[in-house]
Image (cartoon, rainbow, N blue to C red):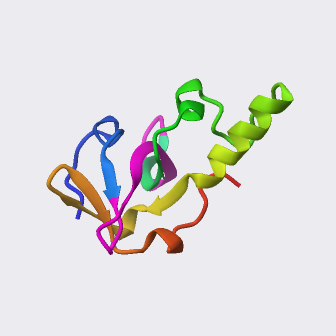
Amino acid sequence: MVPELPVGQLFGRPVIDVDGRTIGNVHDARLRRDGPYIPGFGPALRVDGLVVRLQSIAGRLGIDRSNIAGPWPLDVWGRRAARRARFVPWDTLTFENDALRTRLTAVELPVAYQ
């Protein structure tokens, strides 16, 4: 179980798979709008899962997404980096010693950016 804390405090934390291997660090969070109804806002947001990837130059430049359009070399480089990012479902995570651990292996995790 992951303790209640602001989503921003998850970014940069390492994520470890069931075999003890580091998958990468938390890069992004995906939210789902299906929580309890809040007047004036609508359904509350909840975390659906985390996007995890290893640090890369493409990530620092912000081109590690599959939908980036730019000059040919950067476009190809960004798509290649995006394929390495993984989506970790929230319900598979536990919190251990400042890191997050998933009960899945890295191979079982879906690609984050389609």
Residue 78 in the image: above or below residue 25: above
52 and 41: which one is in front? 52
Residue at 41% x, 74% y is 104
Count of labels in the image: 0
42 and 26: which one is in front? 26
* Picture quadrant of residue 21: bottom left
Residue 22 locus on image (x, y percent): 35, 58
Residue at 24% x, 53% y is 99
Residue 67 in the image: above or below residue 103: above
* Picture quadrant of residue 64: top right
Q: Give the range drawn in magenta.
A: 16-41
Residue at 51% x, 53% y is 32
48 and 24: which one is in front? 24
Residue at 36% x, 67% y is 17
Q: Let me know if residue 111 is in the magenta part.
A: no
Residue 87 in the image: above or below residue 78: below
90 sits left or right of 76 in the view: left
Residue 76 locus on image (x, y percent): 78, 39
69 and 19: which one is in front? 19
68 sits left or right of 59 in the view: right
